[in-house]
Image (tube, rainbow, N blue to C red):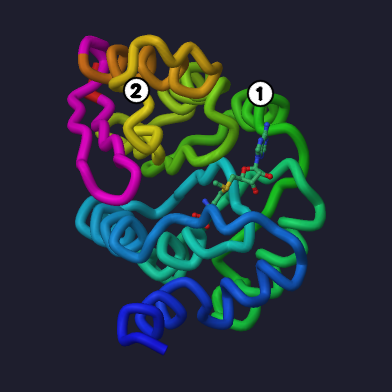
């Protein structure tokens, strides 16, 4: 076996990836450099309440929860009960259960519910169904404390956003999303070219 092959195995087939494969769950968690960036952004910004949209097996949730003080909270929205159950197992193993709540259901409904309850958050991570990204951005702004950070993954769509002939629902929405975060007067934004593209926005004080 070549060194490269061994590296790939180590990188992509660690215990978490193996567990995902065994459960026939997709290998679409953020890469570690995106996880570390999320951790640092949450930590540097002093976030106490974090909202994640799209949990899968809890890999990004763990990076986010580790950035919190003991009294902090991550609320993670996940449509699949199977994914949420696996994420809870991993959060338990990481000793972070007291900091994390999973809300199972369509994030569109969960977001409306959080708005009705008057909840507010300091940090957001959007990483679920791409065609809903603009909707999620609007709801995140509604739920944001002044100065909150909104992050969103997969803004490069593996380069598909640059091919204007590609009119698939995901690249189409993500092109609009990227224009929106670049021009929305309520936000200050940057697209970091790490992983598959990580958007970082700050919600301005009114
Ligand atoms: C890319 S994965 C999340 C990966 C995770 N953030 C990580 O890096 O470890 C996307 C997740 O969003 C969930 N999802 C898709 N559509 C959703 C929706 N409408 N509401 C809530 N969750 C959704 C999927 O079930 C999947 O688990």
Residue 35 on image: x %, y %: 36, 60
Q: Is residue 182 left or right of residue 172?
A: left
Q: Which residue is mark 1?
A: 112
Residue at (28% x, 27% y) in the render: 203
Q: Do labels 2 and 1 touch, CB within 8 Å?
A: no
Name above or below for residue 130 compared with residue 123.
above
Q: Is residue 127 left or right of residue 112?
A: left
Mark 2 or mark 1, which has the lower sequence index? Answer: 1
Q: Quadrant of the C terminus?
A: top left
Secondary element at image label 1 = helix
| Ligand 1 closer than 8 Å to label 2 CB | no
Residue at (22% x, 34% y) in the render: 191
Q: Quadrant of the N terminus?
A: bottom left
Residue at (60% x, 25% y) in the render: 115
Name above or below for residue 129 compared with residue 97.
above
Q: Reply yes or no: does residue 74 show up in magenta.
A: no
Q: Which residue is mark 2?
A: 161
Q: Is residue 104 left or right of residue 61?
A: right
Q: Is residue 174 left or right of residue 133?
A: left
Q: Reply yes or no: does residue 193 show up in magenta.
A: yes
Residue 140 on image: x %, y %: 46, 28
| Ligand 1 closer than 8 Å to label 1 CB | no
Residue 36 on image: x %, y %: 30, 64
Q: Which residues are magenta?
A: 183-203
**Location of residue 192 (image quadrant):** top left
Name above or below for residue 151 compared with residue 144.
below
Q: Of residues 101 and 128, which is closer to you in this image?
A: 128
Looking at the image, the residue that sits furthest to the front is 1
């Amino acid at each position: 076996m070549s060194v490269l092959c061994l590296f790939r195995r180590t990188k992509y087939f660690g215990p978490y990836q193996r567990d995902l494969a065994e459960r026939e769950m997709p290998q679409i968690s953020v890469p570690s450099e995106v996880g570390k960036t999320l951790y640092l952004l949450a930590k540097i910004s002093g976030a106490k309440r974090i909202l994640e949209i799209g949990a899968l097996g809890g890999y990004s949730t763990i990076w986010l929860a580790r950035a919190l003080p003991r009294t902090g909270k991550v609320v993670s929205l996940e449509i699949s009960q199977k994914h949420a159950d696996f994420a809870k197992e991993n959060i338990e193993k990481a000793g972070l259960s007291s900091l994390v709540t999973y809300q199972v259901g369509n994030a569109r409904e969960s977001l409306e519910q959080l708005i009705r309850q008057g909840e507010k958050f300091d940090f957001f991570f959007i990483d679920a169904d791409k065609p809903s990204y603009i909707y999620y951005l609007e709801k995140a702004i509604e739920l944001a404390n002044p100065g909150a950070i909104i992050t969103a993954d997969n803004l490069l769509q593996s380069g598909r956003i640059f091919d204007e002939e590609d009119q698939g629902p995901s690249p189409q929405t993500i092109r609009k999303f990227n224009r929106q975060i670049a021009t929305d007067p309520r936000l200050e934004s940057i697209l970091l070219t790490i992983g598959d593209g990580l958007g970082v926005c700050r919600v301005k004080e009114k």
